[in-house]
Image (tube, rainbow, N blue to C red):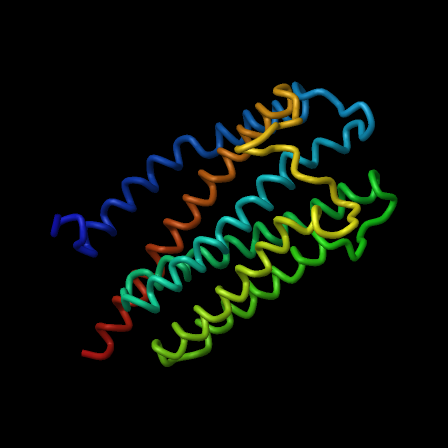
């Protein structure tokens, strides 16, 4: 058990996992793109514009999931003072922000042919835009606040407030009149997306998750090296 908690062994293990993921991530994304562009059918109303969904939806899901995980890790770190956890949420935050930007950008591309406008102050769109600012403020907080304890407190506060925004994002289409369609995929309920579109969406989601894991592990290893160098300089 001590072996698995050893930072050196964790660093070695993440390197092995990283090399394993590298083998599969590009082929799976290529397969997903082929399914999305050529095998998946057009939508009977939106036509080929619906294909933006295969990038937009996984990006939005990953962005939301990253922030939810960051909030959980911040609370755990705040309570138990586990230093290594801060490396995890510092590695996740830029990834979540990137996918948040992708979700907003692809949503704008999708909105123009379906709604007739690139942007609308729709409840779902606006709350997703607010999430970008939560990400940016969160990243700036741990970047520029040098005191670890103060940084942890502020990051926890930002992440908990951001959780309220996540709830708004989730239920905005139910609470307010909105251009954005309600969720078509429900794990606990009925899914209205046909399997011919659901399969490419699943492949793209899996490919994006692998890519997220790849970037996360690379970033985590860089953060670990940076912390070790900083510790050695103090000696």
Q: Nearer the viewer, residue 184 or 152?
A: 184
Residue 119 in the image: x percent, y percent?
Answer: 80, 53
Q: Is residue 24 above or below residue 144?
A: above
Look at the image and tell me in which quarter the C terminus lies: bottom left
Residue at 54% from the left image edge and 50% from the top image edge: 64
Question: Where does the image place residue 109, in percent across and percent down from the top left?
Answer: 76, 44
Image mark count? 0
**x and y, in percent, of residue 86 in the image:** 35, 64
96 left or right of 116 in image: left
**Residue 33, quarter of the rendered image:** top right
Residue depicted at 80% across the width and 30% down the height: 46
Q: Is residue 200 above or below residue 86?
A: above
Q: Check the image and name the residue furthest to the left.
A: 2
* For residue 221, side relative to residue 4 (left or right): right
Which residue is depicted at the point 61% across and 65% down?
A: 133
The residue lying at 61 percent from left, 23 percent from top is 35
Is 217 positioned to the left or the right of 105 in the image? Answer: left
Q: 60 or 169: nearer the eye?
A: 169
Up/down of 150 relative to 188, above or below: below
On the picture, is 24 further left or further right than 10?
Answer: right
- Residue 196, given in percent of the width and then of the height, sits at 64, 19
> Is 228 rendered above or below residue 190?
below
């Amino acid at each position: 058990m001590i072996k698995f908690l050893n930072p050196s062994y964790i660093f070695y293990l993440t390197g092995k996992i990283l090399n394993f993921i590298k083998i599969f991530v590009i082929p799976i994304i290529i397969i997903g793109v082929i399914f999305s562009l050529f095998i998946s059918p057009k939508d009977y109303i939106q036509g080929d514009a619906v294909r933006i969904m295969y990038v937009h939806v996984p990006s939005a899901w990953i962005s939301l999931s990253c922030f939810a995980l960051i909030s959980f890790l911040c609370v755990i770190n705040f309570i138990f003072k586990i230093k290594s956890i801060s490396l995890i949420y510092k590695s996740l935050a830029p990834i979540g922000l990137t996918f948040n930007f992708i979700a907003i950008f692809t949503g704008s591309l999708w909105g123009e042919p379906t709604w007739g406008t690139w942007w609308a102050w729709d409840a779902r769109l606006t709350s997703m835009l607010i999430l970008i600012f939560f990400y940016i403020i969160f990243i700036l907080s741990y970047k520029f606040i040098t005191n670890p304890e103060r940084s942890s407190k502020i990051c926890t506060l930002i992440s908990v407030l951001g959780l309220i925004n996540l709830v708004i994002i989730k239920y905005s289409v139910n609470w307010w009149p909105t251009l954005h369609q309600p969720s078509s995929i429900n794990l606990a309920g009925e899914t209205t997306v046909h399997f011919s579109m659901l399969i490419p969406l699943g492949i793209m989601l899996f490919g994006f998750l692998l890519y997220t894991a790849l970037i996360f592990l690379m970033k985590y290893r860089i953060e670990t090296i940076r912390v070790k160098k900083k510790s050695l300089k103090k000696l």
